[in-house]
Image (cartoon, helix red, strand yellow):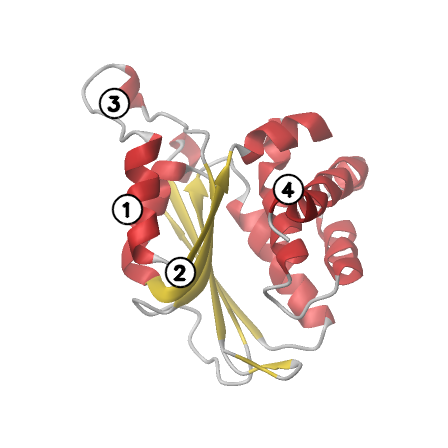
Amino acid sequence: MLIANKIEKFNLLITGVGGQGNLLSSEIIATAAVIEGYKVRVADVFGAAQRGGSVLSHIRIGENVFSPIIHQRSADIMLGFEPAECLRTLRFLSRSCTAIVNTRPIYPRDVSVGNLTYPSTPQIIFLLQKMVKNLIYRDFTEIAEKAGSSRVLNVVMVGLLAGLELLPIRKETFIKAIVETVPSSAKELNVKAFELGFEETFRRYV
């Protein structure tokens, strides 16, 4: 819930697989919130992350936040870097949730060898549309590639989040957090990715 320019309690969930940058994106968002003067709690939950397993990041911002873990049916925003992983988070999403979903899949080994079937994009979108108030989806990896690397997908989606103004955190604060967080050799690439994600908001969603 947002109250005036203060956050009483706000829950943001990031889901993906190992190697997609969950931890960096949660660090950027948390750092930006701290710069703006908010209290922040962060928790990261790992599967077999080094082998492309599930990674789930809980970010809680606000005056009335004490536990780092988001309760079921309480997430206000979900950033989904991998579409099938978004389905694992359904129990956390509130009915008023805004879900931002990357539609490019990363197939687990069991799918690649034919032991399991990966759900289709229309199936995933249909299920998410039933569970959330607002659903924004596209191949955001494509935008990351335009920035210079598919590895900055996470920062592209943080840029989109900033452009949607779902949190009272200024664009320049997000950029400052990126500069403080990423290695010096990657600053230019990540700022470019953020800017492209931010610009995407105004091309499609505003």
Q: Tell me the residue that label 1 is attached to.
A: 127
Whether 98 is drawn above or below 55: the answer is below
In the displayed structure, does residue 19 sit left or right of residue 162?
left
Q: Say which mark, if any, is on residue 102.
A: none
Mark 4: few, some, or many residues within 10 Å (few <14, many ≥20)?
many
Q: Give the distance between the C-alpha atoms of the residues marked 4 and 1, in whole angstroms.
A: 24 Å
Q: Which residue is mark 3?
A: 110
Q: Nearer the viewer, residue 144 or 48?
A: 144
Q: Which mark is residue 133?
A: 2
Residue 1 rendering spot, x and y as whole percentages: 49, 78
109 w.r.t. 65: above or below = above
Numbered-mark total: 4
Of marks 4 and 1, the one in the foreground: 1
Q: Earlier in the sequence, mark 1 or mark 2?
A: 1
Mark 3 vs mark 4: give the one in front.
4
Residue 48 in view? no
Numbered disc 1: secondary structure: helix
- Is residue 145 positioned above or below 49 on the image? above
- Disc 4 residue type? Val
Q: Secondary structure at mark 4?
A: helix
Residue toward you, 178 or 145: 145
